[in-house]
Image (spheres, rainbow, N blue to C red):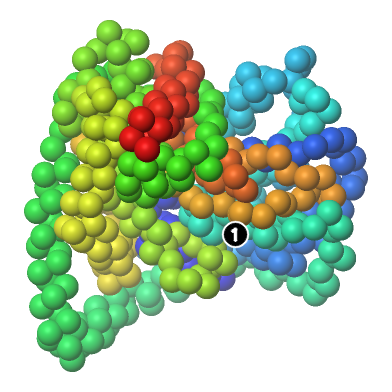
Amino acid sequence: MDRLSPLDAIFVDAEDQDPHTSMAIASISVFEGPAPSHEDFLADVAGRLPLLPRYRQKLRTVPFRLGRPVWVDDPNFDLGYHIQRTALPAPGGDTQLSELMGRVMSQRLDRDHPLWEYWVAEGLADGRWALIFKIHHCMVDGVSGTDLYRLIFDSTPEPPPPAADHRVAGAEPAAARLAARAAVDLALTPVRGAAALSGVLADPGRAARQVSDSVRATAKLATALRPAPASSLTGPIGSRRRYTWARASLKQVKAIKRELGGTVNDVVLAAITSGFRDLLLARGEQPRPHTLPSLVPVSLRAPGEESIYENRVSAVVASLPVHVADPAGRLAAVRAELSALKDSREVILGAELASLGGYSPFPLISRGIRAAFALPQREIVTVTTNVPGPRQPLYGLGRPMLETIPYVPIATTVRTGISIFTYCDQVTFGVTGDFGTNPDLDVLARGIERGVRDLRQASEHRS
């Protein structure tokens, strides 16, 4: 019985607060055909379950919310419940696949079962098939979710033999036991806080530097979190989702950064900024400074921690310069913004705030999270998350994976979100939108692709 980390518990609370929110992350992986049979796919996943113990555990909340939720073995685990199969209508192109993804991601994962699903989709054009991989954000973040590919897919066309399975499901704990254990943890909270404080007092110089960094970060964050100008990008959302994507060549993105400066992340954020600028203009809205503050998650994992399946992230808030018309100028503005955020150490403040959950009573933290999600806000207009994926080809039951397209959830008044993923030599931008307020979501996706082309032209003129 494992208790969720404070950050993982936040994703559960966020979903509990908002009936229109599903905090599942996902991806679509497209493979060469033919699709495996249902029996072969079930057998393949069954052979990998010993490597994925969390796949056979479900979430249990603690009575009276005395403590963070816990993972417990599901005594009635049924693999068939988690493996769905469907077929796309003709012609089986991107439109039909994106519509399927929107429907799948509009539904919450069932808390009575382990929080993951696979959807095998047949009928893609050119004899291809796809796998939708859906998992709750409280189980993984982007980096650890990507590491799961190492376990569910193969680096060669030949699948490995099934892993030995000696697991025996434990009995599901009674509610009284959960409450008693949470009460003990709650009583020990001041002790953990005192231990953390003693560590700080043992190194006062380090503590002073941390305070200085936190003050600078707080000042920057206070500026970043001012309300954005009103636009169609924020407002109430429903439970249904639209989904589409954009594609770019990683080789071209790297060529742009070589000529115009910056990083791969700078270039893709500049392209996303271009897409949002196109969307606003198409809606008859004038892009202005600070119109697009974006939450940008930042991984806090040390090398080798990719396979720790919990959230280890912080975040910064970057104001994307949609008001800048010139493509090269937009990239320069993105670079300047991210450089200032790095200097402000805002990401450290986010990590420190998240860590406070380990030293604070969970009932108070939970109540605060729920209150925050109940309030309207315009300080964050979108989320843009960039996750490096495998650089080597992967295979699913011997079939080559052609591309992977990521999905990021949206919540509260954030009507769009974009997840960036690199696989081999391709970059894909998964674009999530609220269904009712984004009938023109393709304008954003095509604007991202045009943004990359415009930057490439600008870099060629520079060279």
Q: In the image, is residue 154 above or below residue 338?
A: below
Instruction: Please give left or right for residue 272 compared with residue 149 in the image.
Output: left
Q: In the image, is 147 to the left or to the right of 445?
A: right
How many labels sit on residues? 1
**Quadrant of the rendered image containing residue 273:** top left
The image position of residue 171, as x and y in percent, is 68, 68
Q: Is residue 367 above or below residue 62?
A: above
Rendered residue at 34%/10% (across/down): 282
Q: Amino acid at mark 1?
A: Asp
| Residue 151 figure quarter | bottom right
Query: Quick check: can you spot residue 285?
Result: yes
Q: Position of residue 76 (x, y in %)?
A: 74, 56
Quarter the C terminus occupies: top left
Report the residue at 17% width, 23% height from top.
288
Residue positioned 72% across, 52% down in the render? 394
Front-most of 216 and 170?
216
Q: Position of residue 102 (x, y in %)?
A: 57, 26
Query: Foreground: 388 or 2?
Result: 388
Residue under label 1, please give it.
147
| Position in image of residue 453 (x %, y %) | 45, 27
Farthest-out residue, front = 463
In the image, farthest residue toward the top: 284
